[in-house]
Image: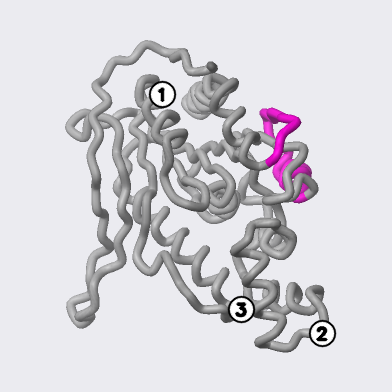
Amino acid sequence: MGCASTEKNERSCNQEEIVMSEPAAAENSSSPFQAKVRFFGERKKPAARSILIMPPTGGTNYIDRRYAQELCNNNYDVYILNEWSEMSSRTIELTLHQNYYARAQRAISLVFSEISSEFIGMLGTSLGGLHTSVSLQTQPRLDAAFIITAGLPIIDVIMTSDQDAMIRLRKIRMQEFKFPNESELQKAIENVFHLEPTRLGEHFKNKKIGVALALNDRTVPTKSQQRLVDFFKPDTVLEYSSNHFWGIVKTWLFDSSEVVRFFNSASKTQASP
């Protein structure tokens, strides 16, 4: 198991649930936008480096927590973003994805606003990797990101995933909106989705990027993962002859220490004159 720490731990790794809130406008009586995170570290002794972990579909799991513990043991403050305001929606409207990803970026910005570290990294798995891909283009304070089994373009992933929820959503939309074929449905979604990383320029330049690929993946199709690699041209690439689930598991089981080393190297590079 690749879980040995690569730097001496100088701090305690306490865990705490934190609710972060945007300032509420005085004239607005509605509840403020919030993000809920699990924090690993010492809040009274902030680290010079922080990592935000974006979990996969289904929310925070054992692997996310193990990554957080290992990174904390390497002198990072670690935040796992568990949820944010209006995170779930039952609508089938084509604007669903724009609204969802925009709220996620709002939550990420809120977490970043509470971080004083000079270095900020993100670790995203599957759906969390899609959010991380967007962040590489939209979050100026983000210095480095490691993306596990995610792909681009995002709408391609949504339209080709074998995940049951995505298959059902495609079928319902085809029936409800009477598109002649899925290609027309995809074009219509793309027209109202404005956070596609491949259409946001090259703001990721000068950021350190690592990627883990699952070479037999149908949930986030491998061809989409390869497109992500082709677009970002990452510094580190790990490959596994696995499906989606086992690609995620193997990255942690065999190479979590490589993920930690990636961030250690990235933070040192960022700190260099």
Residue 75 sits in quarter: top left
As drawn, 119 above or below 135:
above
Mark 3 lies on a secondary structure that is: loop
Of marks 1 and 2, the one in the foreground? 2
**163 left or right, relative to 71:** right
The residue stretch that appears in magenta: 224-243
- Decide which of tag 3 and tag 1 comes sooner along the chain: 1
Q: Position of residue 207 (x, y in %)?
A: 59, 38
Residue picked out by circle 3? 94
Amino acid under disc 1: Glu
Q: Position of residue 231 (x, y in %)?
A: 74, 47
What is the C-alpha distance between the residues marked 3 and 1?
39 Å
Q: Position of residue 228 (x, y in %)?
A: 72, 46
**222 left or right, relative to 93:** right
As drawn, 23 above or below 5:
below
What is the C-alpha distance between the residues marked 1 and 2?
50 Å
Amino acid under disc 3: Leu
What is the C-alpha distance between the residues marked 3 and 2?
16 Å
Q: Position of residue 261 (x, y in %)?
A: 53, 20
Can residue 273 be seen from the camera position used here? no
Can residue 122 be seen from the camera position used here? yes
Residue picked out by circle 1? 70
